[in-house]
Image (cartoon, rainbow, N blue to C red):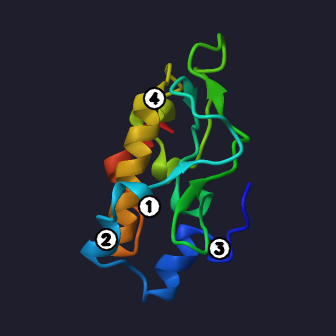
Amino acid sequence: MEYAPGGSLSDKIKRQGGRLDELAIRSPPSRRPRRARLPPRRDVVHYDVKNQNVLVCSCGRANIADFGCARRADAEGERECFKGTPMFMAPEGARGEEQGTPADVWALGCMVIEMATGRPPKLEHLHVDAL
């Protein structure tokens, strides 16, 4: 993995006064998060996508890190575990149901909310009663 002197995306948000402007959020595709440490694969579910797990390189590119919860999407018995950070977790994950790539897409949406507002989504939007 390349060195990320910019720290995490969460650190960048704090340095920018608590939130990012629209232009920074809508960065060109070449600067959107990509996976670090793993070969490009469409069948890997991260399960813990959040701004703290996106590292910013010196060129401004973002790399997804911390694959401690990641699993292949087709791994048996792994999808029904409680994994990830509750405020970024898809409702099906919070309920202990089977998860897949859509759970990471949900978390990416939560990341955008935090980038725009400076706060993660409100817990009632994440079905906390299911936790």
Q: Amino acid at mark 2?
A: Ala
Q: Which element carries disc 1, helix, strand or loop?
A: helix
Local crowd at mark 1 within 10 Å, few (<14), some, or many (≥20)?
some
Residue 38 lies, in percent from the top left, at 68, 38
Of the image marks 4 and 3, the number of the one nearer the N terminus:
3
Choose top left, top right, bottom left or bottom right for residue 44.
Answer: top right
Q: State the residue at coordinates (58%, 37%).
A: 46
Of the image marks 2 and 4, the number of the one nearer the N terminus:
4
Q: State the residue at coordinates (58%, 13%).
A: 74
Residue named by callout 3: 7
Of the image marks 4 and 1, the number of the one nearer the N terminus:
1
Residue 101's label in the rendered image is 4
Residue 111's label in the rendered image is none
Estimate the spatial distance between the alpha carbons at disc 3 and disc 1, rounded to whole Å: 15 Å
- The reply to whether dot 3 and dot 2 touch (C-beta < 8 Å) is no
Residue 116's label in the rendered image is 2
Residue 27 lies, in percent from the top left, at 34, 65
Choose top left, top right, bottom left or bottom right for residue 11.
Answer: bottom right
Of the image marks 3 and 2, the number of the one nearer the N terminus:
3
Of the image marks 1 and 2, the number of the one nearer the N terminus:
1
Residue named by callout 1: 31
